[in-house]
Amino acid sequence: MTRYHLDAMTGKRIAYTAEEETAKNAEEAATKTEKDKVLYQKLRTGENGVRGKTIATYPEISEQLDLLWHAIDADADLKVKFAGFYDAIKKVKEASPKP
């Protein structure tokens, strides 16, 4: 579909040239990308430091760490690769077992 702009001198509608159309599309894409970035940040952080919508969908950090520990616990190679993390959490888990 042809797009138009107004001629400042005559006030008439003038169709964009192919080059103008390409430049306009690139400008609009860049503007949309920037707006999307800003919206994403607002959704992530929320207003005035309040948890945003996307952050609220993640499990709590403690739950994420527990899931990570259990994934390592199920894999012998990961136990070796992440021994410091694994052993530190294991020590706490053994000292305070779930009822």
Image (spheres, rainbow, N blue to C red):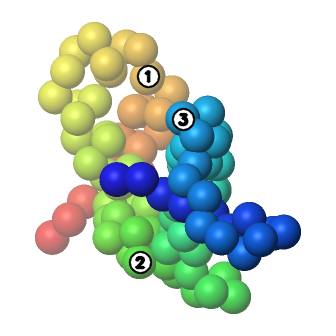
Residue drawn at x 60%, y 67% as measured from the top left: 13
The residue to which callout 1 is attached is: 83
The residue to which callout 2 is attached is: 53
Q: Residue furthest front?
A: 10
Residue type at mark 2 is: Lys
Q: Quadrant of residue 50?
A: bottom right
Q: Which label lies toward us, 1 or 2? A: 2
Horizontal and vertical percent position of residue 91: 40, 43
Residue drawn at x 15%, y 70% as measured from the top left: 99
Q: Residues within 10 Å of mark 3 (few under 14, many from 20)?
A: few
Residue type at mark 3 is: Ala
Horizontal and vertical percent position of residue 82: 43, 23
Label 2, secondary structure: give it: helix
Q: Which label lies toward us, 3 or 2? A: 3
Residue type at mark 1 is: Ala
Label 3, secondary structure: give it: helix
Horizontal and vertical percent position of residue 2: 42, 53
For the residue pair 13 and 93, the one nearer the viewer reads as 13
